[in-house]
Image (cartoon, helix red, strand yellow):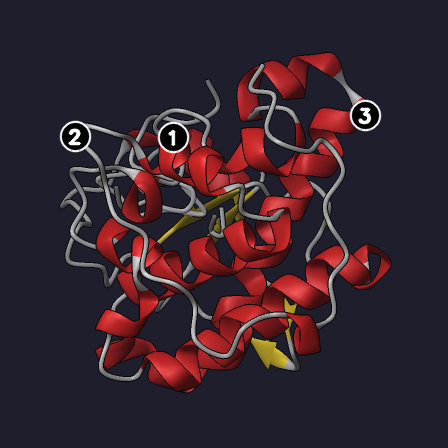
C-alpha cells in the first residue's frame, strides 16, 4: 500500500499488506512453517548485515532463518510501521493480527492455486511476495532495517516479545485464528508511509473498498476501529 499494509494485516505501507495495488512461486527454504516454542528463540535477535545489493529475502536465505524467526521479524517491522506512537493501545492485538493475516494468505494459497499465484506459496513465499509487505522487506522502506536488526528500536525488547508471541500463536495454533479466513489485506492509515488518498483498494470512498472492508473484527478481545489497521477481504 503507499499504503500501508496487511499490505493484510492488514498484512510500503500495506502496507500490510501493502504498498502495492492488491488483489491483483516463491519456494522458500521450507513450505511447511516451523513450529518452534518461544523458549528456543534467542531473546536478542541477531542483526543481519546486507552484503552488496542483497534483498532482505536473499539475506534470510543466506542466514537460513527459520520460518518462525522470519515471521517474527516481519510482524516486528510491520507492527512498528503502523505508527505505534498513535496506536500503542492496540499493541498486543495489532501484532497478533499481522501474524494471523499472513497465515490467512498461506492457508488460501495452500487451498487454491490461484491464491498461490497472487500471494505466494508457503510462509516464505507469502512474506516475500513482491510489493506486498513492503514496510518490512523492501530495501526502500526505512522500517525494513528493523526487520534486519530489531534491536535498533528503542523499545525492541517489549516489541520483540510481542512479535515472538504472535508468530508462535499463528504457527503453532492456526486453528485459533480469530480473523475471518477471507481477510488478506490490511491498510495502516496512521503510518508515515500512508498516502492521501489511500491506494484504490483501501480507499473507502470507492465501492470496491467499501465492499471489501471488514469493520467488525476482534483480536485478543479488542474490537478494532479503523484507527490503526483497516482489514479488507478481497
The answer to whether the residue labelled 2 contacts the one labelled 1, judged by CB atoms less than 8 Å apart, is: no
Tell me: 170 left or right of 49.
Answer: right
Q: Residue 220 is drawn in which quadrant?
A: bottom right
Q: CA distance from mark 2 to mark 1?
A: 11 Å
Left or right of 5, for residue 154: left
Badge 2 or badge 1: first in the primary sequence: 2
Per the image, label 1 sits on a secondary structure element best described as helix
Q: Residue at the spot x=62%, y=38% of the render?
A: 123
From the viewer's perspective, is the residue at label 2 or at label 1 nearer? 2
Cα distance, mark 3 to mark 1? 27 Å
Q: Nearer the viewer, residue 5 or 180?
A: 5
Q: Which residue is mark 1?
A: 58
- For label 2, the crowd category at 10 Å Cα-Cα, with few meaning under 14, some 14 to 19 and many 20 or more, is few
- Give how far across and how far down residue 98 sits, in percent: 52, 57
Asked if residue 199 lies left or right of residue 40, the reply is left
Q: Residue drawn 62% across and 74% down?
A: 165
Q: Which residue is mark 2?
A: 52
How many discs appear? 3
Badge 3 density bin: few <14, some 14–19, many ≥20, Cα 10 Å: few
Name the element at disc 3.
helix
Q: Which residue is mark 3?
A: 111
Position of 78 relative to 54 (above/below): below
Residue 125 location (% of width, % of height) = 56, 28
The residues bearing labels 3 and 2 have C-alpha atoms spaced at a distance of 38 Å
Amino acid at each position: 500500500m503507499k499504503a500501508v499494509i496487511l499490505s493484510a494485516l492488514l498484512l510500503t505501507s500495506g502496507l500490510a499488506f501493502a504498498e502495492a495495488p492488491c488483489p491483483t512461486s516463491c519456494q522458500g527454504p521450507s513450505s511447511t512453517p516451523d513450529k518452534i516454542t518461544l523458549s528456543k528463540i534467542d531473546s536478542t535477535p541477531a542483526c543481519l548485515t546486507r552484503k552488496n545489493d542483497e534483498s532482505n529475502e536473499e539475506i534470510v536465505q543466506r542466514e537460513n532463518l527459520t520460518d518462525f524467526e522470519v515471521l517474527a521479524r516481519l510482524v516486528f517491522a510491520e507492527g512498528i510501521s503502523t505508527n505505534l506512537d498513535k496506536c500503542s493501545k492496540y499493541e498486543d492485538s495489532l501484532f497478533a493480527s499481522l501474524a494471523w493475516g499472513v497465515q490467512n494468505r498461506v492457508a488460501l494459497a495452500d487451498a487454491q492455486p490461484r491464491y498461490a499465484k497472487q500471494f505466494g506459496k508457503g510462509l516464505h513465499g507469502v512474506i516475500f511476495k513482491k510489493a506486498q509487505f513492503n514496510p518490512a522487506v523492501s530495501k526502500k522502506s526505512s522500517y525494513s532495517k528493523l526487520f534486519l536488526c530489531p534491536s535498533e528500536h528503542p523499545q525492541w525488547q517489549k516489541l520483540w516479545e510481542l512479535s515472538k508471541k504472535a508468530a508462535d500463536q499463528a504457527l503453532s495454533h492456526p486453528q485459533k485464528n480469530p480473523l475471518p479466513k477471507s481477510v488478506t489485506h490490511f491498510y495502516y492509515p496512521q503510518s508515515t508511509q500512508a498516502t492521501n488518498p489511500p491506494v484504490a483498494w483501501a480507499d473507502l470512498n470507492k465501492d470496491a473498498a467499501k465492499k471489501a472492508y471488514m469493520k467488525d473484527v476482534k483480536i485478543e478481545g479488542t474490537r478494532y476501529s479503523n484507527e490503526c489497521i483497516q482489514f479488507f477481504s478481497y
